[in-house]
Amino acid sequence: YQVDTEAMKGEIFAYDDCLRVEDSEIPKELRIYMGIDLAISEKDSADKFAIVVIGVDKSKRYYVLYYFEDQLRFGAQTAKIKEVYAAYKPIRCYIETNAYQEAQYQELKTSDPDMRITPYEQEKDKIARAWKLTYLFENKRMFFKKNMAHLISHLVLFPNHRYKDLFDALDLAVRASKKKKRRNARSQEFGLI
């Protein structure tokens, strides 16, 4: 058995920065967010459909609560999104809507207008987006359940891993958590002194 310590360093995300916790160590009061990266094909060579659910505590520590990755048809993707959404009830969910993917967002909003789901057009440069996420890892603020070795290896091997869909879904979930609430710009009535 040989251990490749070079691969464990990761080009962007270091293995040692992917902190693992027991389920019992995850705080009970978390703000839940969800990211969805869509894929159009079921072919083995195609990208994969991915979902990542995170929870953020009061100290702005991030806990990956759930992930899913597979090649599914449109209807099966819709069903899986609804299943995970119902299980976790996120505050906000970002769904990638580049190109054809807008159709999935429209399907979800039509079938359940109350879903807190927001379309999001991803920047094409995945590497730049990954570097923007590294501060959470390097500052020991990103935690994974012990059973998430597949997701961790996916991140550590990024950007050289064949599939980048779990990274995209995680990035979308983190972005959903960062959206600021709108403030009422007008604090007083116009025309009053």
Image (cartoon, rainbow, N blue to C red):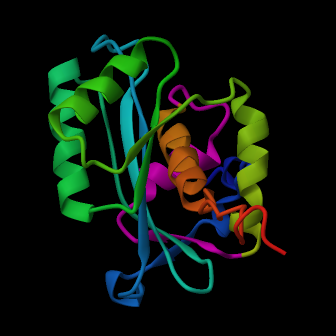
Residue 22, percent from left and from top: 38, 82
- If the image is split into quadrants, where does the C terminus sit? bottom right
The quadrant in which residue 82 appears is top left
Q: Give the residue displayed 19% in from the left and 61% down from the top.
A: 87
Horizontally, residue 192 falls left or right of residue 61, namely right
Residue 67, percent from left and from top: 36, 52
Q: Is residue 47 above or below residue 178?
A: above
Q: Give the residue displayed 52% in from the left and 81% down from the top.
A: 57
The quadrant in which residue 15 appears is bottom right
Whether residue 70 appears in this view of the structure is yes
Horizontally, residue 108 falls left or right of residue 134, namely left
Residue 14, percent from left and from top: 71, 58
Q: Residue furthest right?
A: 193
The quadrant in which residue 191 appears is bottom right
The residue closer to the viewer here, 82 or 146, is 82
Residue 156, percent from left and from top: 63, 49
Horizontally, residue 92 falls left or right of residue 141, namely left
Q: Give the residue displayed 25% in from the left and 49% down from the top.
A: 114
Please provide the residue range marked out in magenta.
Answer: 140-163
Horizontally, residue 76 falls left or right of residue 145, namely left
Q: Give the residue displayed 59% in from the left and 63% down from the top.
A: 181
The residue closer to the viewer here, 25 or 118, is 118
Whether residue 73 appears in this view of the structure is no
Q: Is residue 99 above or below residue 60?
A: above
Number of marks present in the image shown: 0
Q: Is residue 113 above or below residue 38?
A: below
